[in-house]
């Protein structure tokens, strides 16, 4: 039987596209909220004996995780054969160790929730810093797809003489890979984090080549604080208009407004619906399903 694709609210376009690419069909499901804030859901199609793929980008995860788990539990009770999760953006990867006594290592706790509910996971460029792979905390089969080649392709088609810059050392892995794919030079700035929304950025020994177009590259942009400070550091060296790129744009309208105020161009993938999404990862996600739903 053909696989069923079930979209959590806000993920309907992605689920529709993946179902079409995989030769599957959409599973109708009603989601709503009671006046007291509790979630209601009803699976309207019969999933018994079938492979079901839940599609949910986990930006702002606290409001999504309970409906997601309720949907998974309901599908299990209704007799699904296998149950997978496509999460283009995977949340709770930031807290990957106990930085201060008593802190929750939420990346491990969140992984436990997902692994208890699903048979496999497909995601795009999770924020792996202190973990070498998702398998260190996820016990189910995981596919972490890489959008770097899509960013490189966009740069090749849209940017003359690009020079790629990472806003901090954590971004070095993303910057180096994208720069290699599009044949550009690269380097990273130095960042000091002052708080969740405040950072300082310094160029250090990095010098932007004359006549180059600076392209800032990172995996995630949320408030935009890091990228905006990096843009200031770029403008101290060159008047050339800079482009900021991120795989995941998770800040929504607030993020878009921050870049709009300084007339800076931000380009992201559509791993999450946001006003700056210009790079389509649907084909990448579809390729990641091969062998899991066949």
Image (cartoon, rainbow, N blue to C red):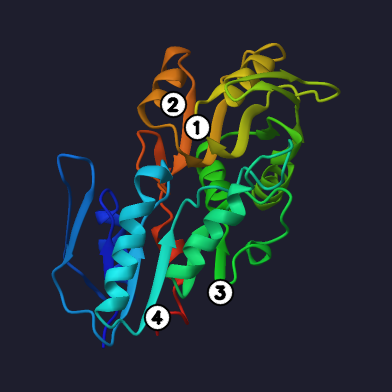
User: What is the secondary structure assignment of the residue under circle 2?
Assistant: helix
Q: Earlier in the sequence, mark 1 or mark 4?
A: 1
Residue neighbourhood size for the residue with mark 2, other residues' Cα within 10 Å, grouped as few (<14), some (14–19), many (≥20) = many
Pointers 2 and 4 in contact (C-beta within 8 Å): no
Task: Say which of marks 3 and 1 sits in front.
Answer: 3
CA gap between label 2 and label 4 equals 36 Å
Pointers 1 and 2 in contact (C-beta within 8 Å): yes
Residue 284 in percent (x, y) is at 46, 62
Q: Which residue is drawn at 55% across and 30% down?
A: 244
Task: Say which of marks 3 and 2 sits in front.
Answer: 3
Q: Which of marks 4 and 3 is nearer the N terminus?
A: 3
Q: Name the residue under label 1.
A: 222
Q: Which residue is drawn at 19% across and 40% down?
A: 36
Quarter of the image where one finds residue 207: top right
Q: Name the residue under label 3.
A: 141
In the displayed structure, 101 sits above or below 90; it is above
Pointers 3 and 1 in contact (C-beta within 8 Å): no
CA gap between label 4 and label 3 equals 13 Å
Front one among 49 and 125: 49
Which quadrant holds the N terminus?
bottom left
């Amino acid at each position: 039987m053909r696989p069923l694709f079930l979209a959590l609210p806000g993920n309907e376009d992605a689920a529709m596209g993946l179902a079409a690419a995989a030769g599957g069909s959409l599973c109708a499901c009603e989601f709503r909220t009671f006046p007291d804030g509790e979630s209601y859901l009803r699976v309207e199609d019969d999933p018994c004996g079938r492979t079901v793929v839940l599609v949910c980008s986990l930006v702002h995860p606290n409001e999504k995780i309970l409906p997601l788990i309720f949907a998974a539990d309901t599908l299990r009770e209704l007799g699904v054969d296998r149950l997978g999760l496509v999460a283009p953006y995977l949340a709770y990867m930031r807290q990957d160790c106990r930085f201060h006594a008593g802190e929750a290592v939420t990346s491990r706790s969140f992984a436990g929730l997902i692994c208890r509910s699903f048979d496999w996971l497909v995601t795009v460029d999770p924020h792996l810093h202190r973990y070498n792979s998702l398998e260190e905390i996820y016990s189910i089969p995981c596919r972490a797809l890489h959008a770097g080649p899509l960013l490189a392709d966009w740069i090749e088609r849209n940017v003359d003489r690009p020079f790629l810059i990472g806003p901090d050392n954590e971004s070095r892995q993303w910057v180096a890979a994208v720069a290699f794919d599009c044949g550009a030079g690269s380097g990273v700035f130095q960042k000091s984090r002052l708080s969740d929304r405040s950072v300082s950025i310094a160029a250090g020994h990095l010098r932007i080549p004359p006549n180059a177009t600076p392209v800032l590259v990172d995996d995630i942009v949320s408030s935009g604080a890091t990228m905006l400070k990096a843009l200031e550091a770029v403008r101290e060296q060159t008047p050339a208009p800079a482009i900021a790129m991120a795989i995941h744009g998770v800040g929504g309208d607030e993020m878009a407004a921050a870049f709009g105020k300084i007339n800076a161009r931000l380009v992201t993938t559509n791993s999450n619906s946001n006003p700056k999404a210009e790079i389509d990862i649907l084909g990448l996600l579809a390729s990641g399903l091969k062998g899991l739903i066949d």
